Amino acid sequence: MKKPVLTIVVPCYNEEDVFQETARQLTAVLQNLQTEHLIAPESKLLFVDDGSRDRTWSLIVEESKKNPFVTGVKLSRNFGHQRALLAGLEAAKEYSDCVISIDADLQDDVRVIREFVVKYWEGFDIVYGVRRSRETDTFFKRATAQGFYRLMKKIGIHLVYNHADFRLMSKRALEELSRYGEANVFLRGIVPLLGFRSTEVFYDRKERFAGESKYPLKKMLAFAFDGMTSFSVAPIRFITLIGFLSFLLSSVAGIYALIVKLLGHAQSGWTSLMISIWLIGGLLLMSMGLIGEYIGKIYQEVKRRPRFTIEENLYNNTQQKERVN
Ligand code: UDP
Ligand code: MG
């Protein structure tokens, strides 16, 4: 087999505190892989600046001038982690045989990148990085993550357990991924749908090297909800079921109330009336909200808007130069 061109895609949003260290460590990884003849010399680190408001982009540009491995793409605004990642994968696909995605904060162990590449040589198209333990996460994050995986599994969405977006994908897997045109990209849900030969590599997840998590609770919840409703109609079925059950219950209660009335023992009935009104009202509102969520999704998808916009692209420039040389 020919040595593959590897591109490591790193989405960055306000990562000025970690950028230099990340670039240093990943450069070392690429150098080592090259001396081991596991990757081609054209391999690159592609940093995607997701509309950062700090110095991230200027750091990327500076680094690219002195470090031949480093290149970058700047999005025109903040598009969110998933789309930034997608932008990087799409850009990298053209010039690479395989692509690895990793977060900028060094929480994922860069040493396992070598294992990813070895698996690629063994013929795997997709290699998932899986966290062995979640010791560095807070109890809260662990509990919510576990609940999330359980729920997703229950409603029929197959995710790789404890895998975030740290993975390797081959060119043909990426080409397949491009055909999934949804506006709500949830890569962890889509990638397993691609098929191909895949495997897992285990690692220990560390603390963020510096800077703050860009996933506060609010974003985490939105992410989970998006993941759920983008992949499954099970929640709609669930509320239909609840609606049906409450309808059954209230008909039984209604018949009971009628009999009591006919027997002449009519209750004042205010309490039960109030309770049922609130119950049904609540159920209705909840159902409408959820259905609205799906309609909103349909609305977003039918618009077919671009999923990201690239403002500057160092990557294309460097690649074209290398081709000419
Ligand atoms: N990120 C991004 N756009 C965003 C939010 C985050 O590109 O709008 C990047 C961020 O720079 C990091 C990765 O996505 O490289 C994961 O974010 P973070 O580490 O904050 O998430 P956590 O690990 O806390 O879930
Ligand atoms: Mg992180």
Image (cartoon, helix red, strand yellow):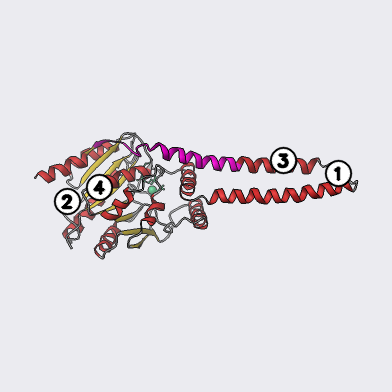
Question: Looking at the picture, does residue 178 appear above or below residue 199?
Answer: above
Give the residue at the far left of this rendering: 325
Q: CA distance from mark 1 to mark 2?
A: 83 Å
What amino acid is at disc 3?
A: Ile
Measure the alpha-carbon separation of dots 1 and 3.
17 Å
Disc 1 marks which residue?
267
N-term-proximal mark, 2 vs 4 = 2
For label 2, the residue is: 42
Q: Amino acid at mark 2?
A: Glu
In this view of the protein, which residue sits in the foreground, 217 or 299? 299
Residue 6 in the image, given as x and y percentages of width and height: 23, 53
Is 302 part of what is drawn in magenta?
Answer: yes
Q: Which residues are magenta?
A: 286-312
Tell me which secondary structure the magenta stretch mostly adopts.
Answer: helix
Task: Give yes or no for contact between labels 4 and 1 (Cβ–Cβ under 8 Å).
Answer: no
Q: Mark number for residue 92?
A: 4
Q: CA distance from mark 2 to mark 4?
A: 12 Å
The answer to whether the residues at label 2 and label 3 have Cβ atoms under 8 Å apart is: no
